Image: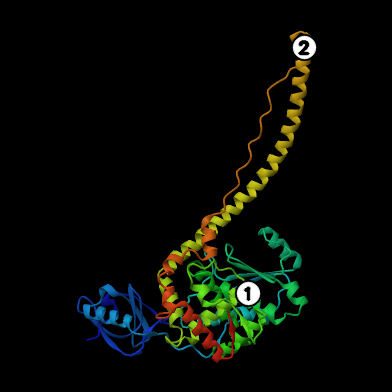
Amino acid sequence: MMVGLKQWGIGCVMLATAFFANAQESGAVRTWTNAEGKSLEAVLVHVNELTAELKMANGTVARVPVASLSKPDQNFIDELKELNLVVPPFPKSVQSSPGGSHFAITGQGEMGPEFDQRFENSYAAASALPFNLDLKPGPDQDKFSIQYADSAGFRSFLSSKKMDPNLQMNAAFILDEVSMFVNYSNIRADKLTPQKQAEIDHEGAALALIRWKPVLPEWFFDGLASNIASIPAVRNEVQLANHEAGLKQFLVTRFELDPRSIAVTSPFKLLDKSAKPWTPTVQNRAGAMLLVYFLMYLDESASPGVPVAQVLESVRAMREEAAAVLQTPESAAANYERKRASFNKEVEAYNNAINKFKDETAAYNDRVRKFNSQVAAGLPEIQRVVVGEKPKMPTPPVAPVMPSETNEVTSGGVSNEALAKVLPHLHPGRTLIEFSDQVAAAFAKIGVPLKY
């Protein structure tokens, strides 16, 4: 007998895109029983260590603690975890929202609605992928922030962030402000070349994925953002089915690689724990993009998207912690900036005090020399110069220390320990060398010749 949700003591939410479905009985209705013997009929659409999501006939989903289910149901779930799991099919296309729906775009010289729409397309592509990415901006923000500036304003911005103002950048993505800054003058002057547009599309996708940055390795986060940015779109229709064409174009436009022989970092180096830390070089970024693409679409040892879903699922339980971690460096960075500004003023005052100290010391030494000569000449004490107290050296200010939380978040180090057990599952039953060769072979089949 089927009972109501209230009798189960659980709430219900509207159905979100599920991570996993049973590969053998996808969509099968099952009678689920809780520990009190009450039952309901539903489809299991997602399960993790703590919660099972059961889709009801009316389209809502009940989130049920696994521990509250009957022993047979718990055994059933344990068996499912040992089976090959698949993600729902990738949609062929999706309509994005009007420009500005999810992004607060400000500043002089806005590029116009067609340009703004590209950010919405990246957001729509990320949202449509069957990974339930749950895109959100930073704390206390309703929308993602994008600020346009002319060349002078952009250079001033770079200087304020202690970055080289002469860097040949078209956009800068700043984690602690959860913002993206765009040099519209540079882009407009070059009539928006494909390479520059691809660069900005990548930064826009990275901005949409901001909540995942603290809990993913840098290469995985960057590769995922590149794949999202590469998905073609015609106006506000994002063509997810054309991901292969988008990949090939992105490799040429974004990374300016030779399509006849694409030199990239191998999966071996990306996944090898003993390798040097990942840095955003062209070969590293292209290698990360291709590895994530392989795991999403080409890995023959798993259903499409399963490896990516497994990595995302492994950190899903850390999302609340990740949000707290993201808030911590934001507030820490803001506090650091305040301390640094105060320190700069203290340094200025200290330098002035040092100059004053030097003058006072010189005057004091003159008085001491004069006093000594007067003593040597036998001048009465009442007629001698008053030496006074020796000037005191001013205390130098203490420079503020960059908060370690910010370094951890921007390096992706927050989740490395947690993912240490997960990443090897990206190449189950295969050595890293075998896996790298398999990746190269898979891309060769679709006309993407790799050179490690």
Residue 109 placement (x, y as % from top left) = 73, 72
- Residue, far left: 37
Is disc 1 surrounded by few (<14), some (14 to 19) or many (20+) residues within 10 Å?
A: some
Amino acid type of the residue tagged 2 in the rendering: Ala
Q: Is residue 357 left or right of residue 120?
A: right
Instruction: Choose top left, top right, bottom left or bottom right for residue 150.
Output: bottom right
Q: Residue at x 72, y 79 (%)?
A: 192
Q: How many marks?
A: 2
Q: Is residue 266 above or below residue 401?
A: below
- Along the viewing direction, whichever of 33 and 161 lies nearer the viewer: 161
Instruction: Choose top left, top right, bottom left or bottom right for residue 64.
Output: bottom left
Q: Is residue 327 above or below residue 285?
A: above
Q: Secondary structure at mark 2?
A: helix
Q: Quadrant of the N terminus?
A: bottom left
Tell me, yes or no, if residue 364 can be seen here: yes
Q: Residue at x 78, y 18 (%)?
A: 370
Q: Residue at x 76, y 8 (%)?
A: 380
Residue 68 placement (x, y as % from top left) = 26, 74
Q: Quadrant of the C terminus?
A: bottom right
Instruction: Choose top left, top right, bottom left or bottom right for residue 120.
Output: bottom right
Residue 179 placement (x, y as % from top left) = 61, 67
Name the N-terminal-most of marks 2 and 1. Answer: 1
Tell me, yes or no, if residue 113 can be seen here: no
The residue to which callout 1 is attached is: 282
| Residue 167 circle label | none
Q: Is residue 64 above or below residue 91?
A: above
The residue to which callout 2 is attached is: 376
Residue 118 placement (x, y as % from top left) = 63, 81
- Along the viewing direction, whichever of 412 and 45 lies nearer the viewer: 412
Q: Secondary structure at mark 1?
A: helix
Q: Residue at x 50, y 89 (%)?
A: 91
Amino acid type of the residue tagged 1 in the rendering: Val
